[in-house]
Amino acid sequence: MSAFAPCAVVEGGPADLDRVMRVMEDSFDPCFGEAWTAAQFAGMMPLPGIWLSLAKQDDKVIGFGLGRSVLDEAELLLLAVNRDSQHQGIGRSLLNHFVDTATQRGASKLHLEVRDGNPALKLYNAAGFVEAGRRWKYYVGRDGQVYDAVTLEKRIGS
Ligand SMILES: CC(C)(COP(=O)(O)OP(=O)(O)OC[C@H]1O[C@@H](n2cnc3c(N)ncnc32)[C@H](O)[C@@H]1OP(=O)(O)O)[C@@H](O)C(=O)NCCC(=O)NCCS
């Protein structure tokens, strides 16, 4: 039995921008330049095929996932969980929710991009995402260090 408080994954929307940005700022290490700005996030929300999933505990947003589907493809654009709520399976719940929602929307090819070395790679690999390509030196850290972006893919129903 889990000792952690229960967490629900629910649909979010543009009105959740501030709550999402609080998680964004708490979770992403600013060293790597992976987090989005509020303007980037707000600009993405109205686009066709976008959906936002929120992980809530006692009505507090502690994590989120942002997905986009186009025809038979879906992309996980962002996944984040507040630091003090990590390692409780919430990221995995949000990822499972992304896979389920993408499948319901008719996607059979799922993909995402992540900085090489991001511990989230372990989570994605465990969920069946495998490396499909790389963008060399895509991320530039605050200290000037460069990191590849790894593209991961998962096929549904094959
Ligand atoms: C990636 C992230 C969302 C994972 O959230 P989480 O709630 O901690 O994930 P889970 O508890 O479901 O982790 C599931 C498993 O994935 C692996 N994992 C996840 N995060 C890990 C980490 N930081 N270090 C090592 N393994 C990790 C582990 O196997 C973990 O199981 P365990 O910790 O119980 O042993 C969270 O670390 C985060 O917000 N990171 C900053 C934002 C980011 O880099 N997002 C990914 C790119 S968009």
Image (cartoon, rainbow, N blue to C red):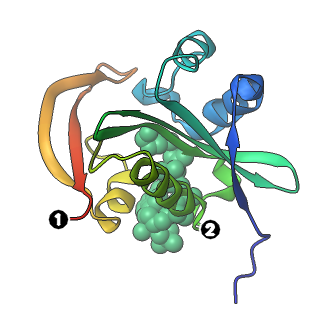
Determine if the C-beta at disc 2 is less than 8 A from ligand 1.
Answer: yes
Which residue extends farthest right?
58
Question: For the residue marked with disc 1, what is the amino acid?
Answer: Ser
Q: Nearer the viewer, residue 23 or 15?
A: 15
Decide: few, some or many residues near mark 1? Use Cα within 10 Å; few <14, some 14-19, many ≥20. Answer: few
Disc with the residue nearer the chain's start (2 vs 1): 2
- Label 2's element? loop
Residue sitting at x 52%, y 17%: 44
Answer above or below: position of 38 versus 80. above
Q: Please provide percent x and percent y for residue 129.
A: 26, 57
Give the residue at mark 1. 158
**Left/right of residue 62 with respect to residue 97 in the rendered view:** right
Q: Nearer the viewer, residue 119 or 48?
A: 48
Question: For the residue marked with disc 2, what is the amino acid?
Answer: Gln
Residue sitting at x 40%, y 29%: 32
Q: Please provide percent x and percent y for residue 25.
A: 64, 30
The image quadrant that residue 139 belongs to is: top left
Q: Is residue 34 visible?
A: yes
Residue sitting at x 68%, y 43%: 11
Q: Please provide percent x and percent y for residue 58.
A: 88, 56
